[in-house]
Image (cartoon, helix red, strand yellow):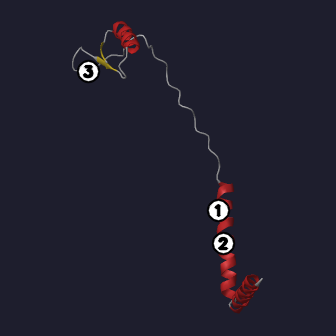
Amino acid sequence: MGEFRHFLLLVWKNFKIKFCHPLMTFVELFIPCVCISLLFNFHMSSREESVSETVYLPYDINNVPPRSWSYGEDTHLFYTPKSEFLNKVMGDVAKMLNLNFTG
């Protein structure tokens, strides 16, 4: 019970000190209210803009586009991890696209 009386005494002391400096008390209460209201107003005034979707044109996956970036005719297809199943799949893809593959 003694701790609660000390707490009430400290609260009363802070209350009395605050009212000895009314301007500072007003500023301590007013500034946070102004900041919160400004943030709320900025949030409410901002408009939600819709961004148009980017639509990419489809391309044929059964052939490789022209290789103007390649210095030679030989194009390699690299993949990982190395397994028998992937070797077979990548071998079929390499034959279909006329590429060399390396596991």
Identify residue for label 1. 39
Vertical arrangement, residue 48 with respect to residue 69, above or below: below
Specify the quadrant of the image occupied by residue 92.
top left
Tag 3: amino acid: Ser
Q: Crowding at label 3, few (<14), some or many (≥20) Cα neighbours within 10 Å?
A: few
Residue at the outermost front position: 1
* Residue 80: x %, y % from top left: 36, 23
Nearer the viewer's eye, disc 2 or disc 1?
A: 2
- Tell me the residue at 37%/12% (across/down): 84
User: Which image quarter holds the C terminus?
Assistant: top left
**Residue 10's quadrant in the figure?**
bottom right
Left or right: residue 56 compared with residue 32: left
Q: Residues within 10 Å of mark 2 (few under 14, many from 20)?
A: few
Residue appearing at x 69%, y 77% in the figure = 29
Position of 85 relative to 81 (above/below): above
Rounded to the nearest whole Å, what is the CA distance between mark 2 and mark 1? 11 Å
N-terminal-most mark, 2 or 1: 2
Amino acid at circle 1: Leu
For marks 3 and 1 on the same chain, the one whose residue lies earlier in the sequence: 1
| Residue at 62% in and 44% down | 49
Name the residue carrying label 2: 32
Q: Secondary structure at mark 2?
A: helix
Query: Do the residues under discs 2 and 3 have CB atoms within 8 angstroms?
Result: no
List the residue tagged with mark 3: 70
